[in-house]
Amino acid sequence: MKKFLAEIDVMPKKEILDPQGKAVTGSMKNLGLSEIQNVRIGKHISLEIEADSSETANAKVDEACKNLLANLIMESYSFKLEEV
C-alpha cells in the first residue's frame, strides 16, 4: 500500500451568494484595501489515504468529496493528490 496526501478545496459555486465573502469584501474597504474585491470564502481539507495506486486514491478522494465533503448543490471542489 502507498500513502497519499490529498489537498481539497471546497468553494461556493459562482452563482451562489457568499455572505461571509461579501462581509469580508466590505471589511477590506474599512481597512484601506478597496483594491481587493469579490472575496469568496470556502474550506480547505487535508487528508491522508492509503491505496494501491494513485488512480485508486484519486477515485476514493473524489467519492469522499461527492458524498460527504462538498454539498454539490451549492459548492464545487477540486483537489491535488501526491504520494508521500
Image (tube, rainbow, N blue to C red):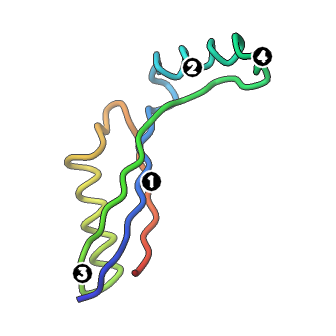
Name the kind of residue labelled 4 in the image: Gly
List the residue tagged with mark 4. Answer: 32
Label 1: state its secondary structure: strand
Nearest to the eye among marks 2 and 4: give it.
4
- Crowding around mark 4 (Cα neighbors within 10 Å: few <14, some 14 to 19, many 20+) is few
Relative image position of residue 23 (x, y in whole percent): 54, 14
Residue found farthest to the front: 31
Earlier in the chain: of badge 3 and badge 1, it is 3
Q: Mark number for residue 51?
A: 3
Q: Nearer the viewer, residue 38 or 66?
A: 38
- Crowding around mark 1 (Cα neighbors within 10 Å: few <14, some 14 to 19, many 20+) is few
Earlier in the chain: of badge 2 and badge 4, it is 2
Earlier in the chain: of badge 3 and badge 2, it is 2
List the residue tagged with mark 2. Answer: 24
Q: Is residue 60 left or right of residue 23?
A: left
Name the kind of residue labelled 2 in the image: Val
Earlier in the chain: of badge 1 and badge 4, it is 4
Nearest to the eye among marks 1 and 2: give it.
2
Distance between mark 4 and mark 3 Cα atoms? 48 Å
Earlier in the chain: of badge 4 and badge 3, it is 4
List the residue tagged with mark 1. Answer: 78
- Location of the N terminus (image quadrant): bottom left
